[in-house]
Image (cartoon, rainbow, N blue to C red):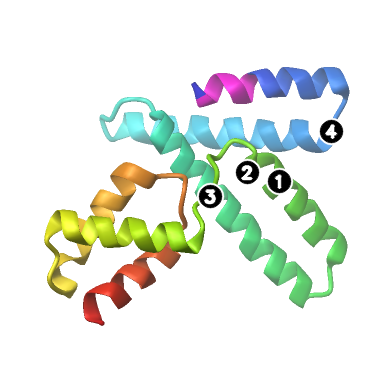
Amino acid sequence: MLRDDINNAVKEAMKAKDERKLSTLRMVNSTLKNADIAARGEGKPPLTDADVLAVLQKMIKQRQESVELYEKGGRAELAAGEREEIAVISAYLPKQMSEDEVKSAISAAVAETGAAGMKDMGKVIAVLKAKYTGQMDFAKASALVKAALTG
């Protein structure tokens, strides 16, 4: 499981005295534990690997936004720290799909669902999330799905 990989990496980072990696992985574990607690409060089971991937993607997206803000504010050292965290977290995500692969996956999902217009966008996104969680940025994919269904 993904959690086991992360926990093993924490131990390795402790042995290697890699402070940045250790603090980032501890933060990941903390975020996952908080997500588990929130799920339990809603009567849901602990996070699956797909849920963990979604949490990791959200963490990366937050850091990318921070990098942009730090760069606008002239804080290059803080932006560099965020980039290092992104690199550590990204190591636990599957290989990201290229734009061409995303477009072909969208075409297949549109054909699979028989989507005819914007009202079917939710069905297409649901199919994509079921098959490609962690492999594509769904914000960008959503725009591509919208373009495919309107154009």
Choose between 100 and 61: the one closer to the eye.
Answer: 100
- Name the front one of labels 2 and 4: 2
Q: Where is residue 102 in the image (x, y as percent from the top left)?
A: 41, 59
Q: Is residue 126 above or below residue 3?
A: below
Q: Where is residue 53 in the image (x, y as percent from the top left)?
A: 47, 39
- Name the residue located 51 percent from the left edge and 33 percent from the top edge: 32
- Name the front one of labels 1 and 4: 1
The kind of secondary structure element at disc 4 is helix
Residue type at tag 2: Ser
Residue beneath disc 3: 96
Identify the main secondary structure in magenta.
Answer: helix
Residue beneath disc 2: 90
Distance in Å between CA atoms under marks 1 and 3: 13 Å
Residue 87 disc label: 1
Q: Is residue 22 above or below residue 87?
A: above
Choose between 40 and 94: the one closer to the eye.
Answer: 94
Distance in Å between CA atoms under marks 2 and 3: 10 Å
Residue beneath disc 4: 19
Distance in Å between CA atoms under marks 1 and 4: 14 Å
The kind of secondary structure element at disc 1 is helix
